[in-house]
Amino acid sequence: MGRRAAIYARVSTTDQSCDRQITELTAFADRGGYEVVGAFRETASGTLANRAARNQIIDLAQARKIDAVLVTELSRWGRSTQDLLDTLHRLAGWKVSVNALSGMTFELDTPHGRMMATLLAGIAQFERDLLSERVRSGLAAARARGKKLGRQPGQRPKSDKLAPKVIEAVEQGRSYRWIAHDLGISKNTVLDIMKRQRKKP
């Protein structure tokens, strides 16, 4: 019996697919003689520490049901430096390694594994910091051009959308408290909608 492995594939947005990653990692597992316990796919930002599919794999590792996690690249597992190191440390405590398609094995109980994990995690964090800086620069440039960002005064997209339902419910004799609970809004929002409605000519 080969080493037991869990395949983990992640994409960031719903218009992307994990299929290619799963195909490549399945072939990788076959070549390496791994027994695949399960293939887990996820649509989530790599910066999120709490991810359902990844949590399932961590549970398998803690239960000693896998020996390795297979990923296309380390950034699929996580992009935050601290999160990467925290999870790799936890996996190492259960004798579980993270193996990438490149052939790199990240085992924090070896000097090489610690060095590579820190290096690649640092690069991933650096890329994210650059992206955040570009966003901030873009927002600053937009403000400098006089463009107003965010919701403008007087804009109430949610309450304006729900206003017809609120008005209809009030006309049916429903209480403000019942309407707020039924529509998932605050009682104050209901009051504001009706206040604006009464002011209309």
Image (spheres, rainbow, N blue to C red):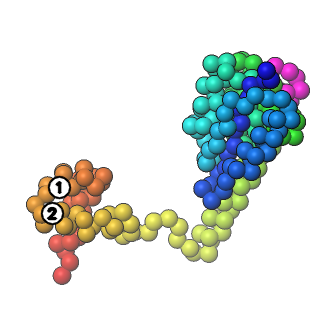
Residue 135, quarter of the rendered image = bottom right
Residue 29, quarter of the rendered image = top right
Residue at position x 68%, y 49% in the image: 18
Give the percent coordinates (x, y) of residue 129. 72, 49
Residue nearest the observer in this picture, 139 or 160: 160
- Using the image, tell me which numbered label, if any, was put on residue 170: 2
Give the percent coordinates (x, y) of residue 62. 64, 20
At numbered mark 2, what does the secondary structure look like: helix, strand or loop?
A: helix
Residue at position x 82%, y 38% in the image: 28
Give the percent coordinates (x, y) of residue 103. 88, 36
**In the shown orientation, is residue 119 left or right of residue 170?**
right
The first of marks 2 and 1 along the sequence is 2
Q: Could you give the CA–CA distance between mark 2 and mark 1, rounded to whole angstroms?
A: 7 Å
Residue at position x 30%, y 64% in the image: 162
**Do the numbered discs 2 and 1 sit on residues whose CB atoms are within 8 Å?**
yes
What crowding class fits label 2: few (fewer than 14 Cα within 10 Å), some (14-19), or many (20 or more)?
some
Name the residue beneath numbered marker 1.
176
Residue 33, quarter of the rendered image = top right
Judge whether 153 appears above or below 3 on screen. Answer: below
